[in-house]
Amino acid sequence: MKVNLSDKILMSVEKPARYTGGEWNMVVKDPGTVDIRFAFCFPDVYDVGMSHLGMKILYHVLNKRDDTYCERVFAPWIDMEKVMRHENIPLFALETKDRIDKFDFLGFTLQYEMSYTNVLNMLDLAGLPILASERDKTHPFVIAGGPCACNPEPIAEFIDFFAIGEGEEVILEILDVYKEWKSSNAERQDFLKRVAKIPGVYVPSLYNVSYKEDNTISKIEPLHPDVPQTVDKRIVSDLDEVDFPEDIIVPFIGTVHDRIMLEMFRGCIRGCRFCQAGFIYRPVREKSPEVLLSQAKGAIEKTGYEEISLLSLSTSDYLCLTDFTEQLLKLTEERKINLSLPSLRIDNFSLDLMEKAQKVRKSGLTFAPEAGTQRLRDVINKGITHEDITSSMQLAFEGGWNNIKLYFMMGLPTETTEDVEGIANLANEIVSIYYGTPKEKRAKGLKVTVSAACFVPKPFTPFQWFGQDTIDKFHDKQKILKSKLSKASRNITYNWHDARVSLLEAVFARGDRRVGKVLLKAWENGCKFDGWNEYFNYDVWMKSFNEEGIEPAFYANRERNFDEVLPWSHLNMGVSERFLQRERERAYKGITTPNCRVQCTGCGSAVFDTGICKDCSIGGEKA
Amino acid sequence: MNIRFQFKRGEELKFISHLEIMRVFERAFKRASIQVTHSQGFNPRPNIVFALPMPVGLSSDGEFADVELEKTYELSDFIEKINSHLPEGIKVVDAKEKTTKTKVMGIVNAARYRIDFEAPKNTEINEIISNVLTKKKIIVLKKTKRGENEFDIRPLVYELSGDFAEGTGFFNVLLGAGQNDNVRPELFIEGVQGCIDIPIEMLKMHRIMLYSSSGNLWLPLLDKRFL
Ligand code: SF4
């Protein structure tokens, strides 16, 4: 059933095109001819959600099936939600404007913890019971995936089941089982039991979690014998074979990443110890240059976009980068298309490449030393030396770049005052490198931006046991850095993060099922769009923790030991616990670990028998 | 080759801004592999210019744009090609070759609108119309870069007719348009409201056609006199 969006409603809200659909390449199907209606839900506003590549991939994969119609749903912005609630307009899908409460599936993608309240809010706007346990046969199945699903426990009460790992294959298997189940006319519970057998599917209601007196977990066990003890993540083994969308939707209104995103590879060889993506997407699997070029060409032709961007965790590590970018540049120049090159290491080659790609103006150069001293960079296994930093800055200034953005983290394990001050020292040193560069070479007007995020320890990293700094500690460190920087050059600007947001991220990144209650309470108390500064309300969050009798520090700031049962211990993302422990020990001793290409260190991902693990000499130690 | 084309935008696409419409065309030309020439300089822009911005919420049958192409096309080919790469709701309906240097935005000076509105059931449309037309001055507040200015729209209301029944009606109005004296539909309604006591509320706005004057005639912008 279509919702009625009158002109009056649409004219009363900001950016009405967020709600009207009809973009180029939008998939149009007759809903009457399909068996499965799937609402792909992104728990943020259209402009953010439409920038997300994962959604584009799944939209494409699902709509390739004749029996399925996948439509998009975004969180209505505050103004629109107000009108919708006032006029009793339920949440609807952009393609058909049909309300989604009678669809077969609602699939949420979980990209960041601070979108969880939006998930709840969207369920409510759709008219569904928020709690999975309260849904019956008349309701869609609510499923979720994405990076945050690697610890799904905080939202386990609201989601019927999760897809762990990469979704494009497992989702098709889920739909096949669904069709079977639907025609068998069996109970809702029966479907959950059936999907639980698909590798990569986690049905939280089929597991029981028990706790010890000290509030840590004593056991997580399946409730039925045929439900797996641990759920292994799914990955796509050959990225050249997976169907990548070229005919992506071209939004009318500007979005955060309004361009073609060409995914070069998944995973990362580096193993920076703070970086969750670097562990959960292992092993590295590259696409071949031929496939990439043909996909680039296809996407350019089918979208008309004026810009294409390379996407990966570390572009510089792509094996055939030189050849590939040469050919890609040819293509983009010929067609007057901009090429943007994020996550490049700064060296002669990349600076030259950026210069070629961006004929226009030299835009800012971003660089992430992550920590202020070499000692701490070794702790986190960043894999760059002080010399690397100074020489790349020298190169950049000589090449005419004068706008440098530096990214750091505060509150990393073992951090001391010296490390915090090291951030300022490094920024200062960079300023003096600029002034040491001959005037005729450097561009006028230096701008150095120092951004320091508050470190949030994440599951499936060597720092998953680490107790996050308290808000007070973060504030102290921010003060130290601020005062140190204020005495420094006026070319430096300092951006800091709201430590209170980072605290919540830490709670929900490593929380167990009990923090779900706080989430529900916070939503009931009005929290939503927590990722947006202007809507984040710390006091309401703290009040909600209080009301549920839950201590955020237990989840955020408490140091765990190795024998604690972690809330995500029944999920297997490939990297073994043993490896993570080893990495953590090395971290605290300041010993670095070589990247996968230099030497395999047996992280456990070799069980997938693909990508870099296949090429490496010793092979991975089986987890 | 220089082409001036007429296009329309339907209900489906009326909620996107003028800037976004420009981008829709730029991307459609790219998809259709119709090569548009680009401006010189640091930030080369495709040479497409539009007659008059389209406010959010406006549908239209009579929009125009000039485009400069790298190659020569049969006009019917051009129309077919671009239309097969434009999203639903926007369509090129006519195109002519342009040989003069004049740009389309420089020649617009009037626009005909159909403006639908809501008003009390006993409203007399003819009374409103004569009320408006007999006024010597109709002062409205126009927002400018420097704040709000008083603006007399009466000399820019060239023609006005309409109909009304059962609480809803419409105006068919020819208003001054273009770079200098542009009267947007909202502004016109504000002006009408100032002339009468009953409350009226705009429901829809639709541009019927953009014109340029030649002698004492209002002519569509594709008229050969302007090409
Ligand atoms: S098994 Fe070895 S090569 Fe494979 S991802 Fe782990 S460390 Fe890298």
Image (spheres, coloured by chain):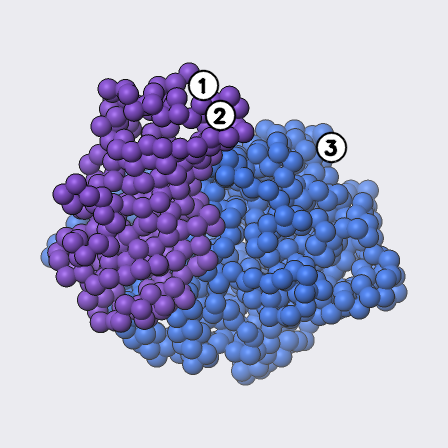
Chain colours: A blue, B purple
Spatial separation of the CA atoms under disc 1 and disc 3: 59 Å
Which residue is more in the foreground, A274 or B92?
B92
Dot 3 amino acid type: Gly
In percent of the image, x 57 and y 81: which residue is there? A614
Query: What's the chain of the residue with tag 1?
Result: B
Spatial separation of the CA atoms under disc 1 and disc 2: 7 Å
Q: Position of residue A293 (x, y in %)?
A: 40, 76
Are circles 1 and 2 on residues that touch, CB within 8 Å? yes
Q: Position of residue A163 (x, y in %)?
A: 68, 61
Q: Few, some or many C-alpha atoms within 10 Å of disc 3 (few <14, some 14-19, many ≥20)?
A: few
Give the numbered dot on residue B119.
2
Tell me if residue A47 comes above or below residue A349 in the rendering: above
Spatial separation of the CA atoms under disc 3 and disc 2: 56 Å
Q: Pick out the residue farthest to the top.
A: B197
- Residue that carries the numbered disc 3 in the rendered image: A549
In percent of the image, x 17 and y 53: which residue is there? B226
Mark 1 or 3: in front is 1
Mark 3 or 2: in front is 2
In percent of the image, x 53 and y 56: which residue is there? A274
Q: Image quarter for residue A191?
A: bottom right
Report if residue A317 is visible in the image.
no
Q: Few, some or many C-alpha atoms within 10 Å of disc 2 (few <14, some 14-19, many ≥20)?
A: some
Give the numbered dot on residue B198.
1
In percent of the image, x 39 and y 58: which residue is there? B91
Dot 1 amino acid type: Ile
Report if residue B90 is visible in the image.
yes
Q: Position of residue A298 (x, y in %)?
A: 42, 73
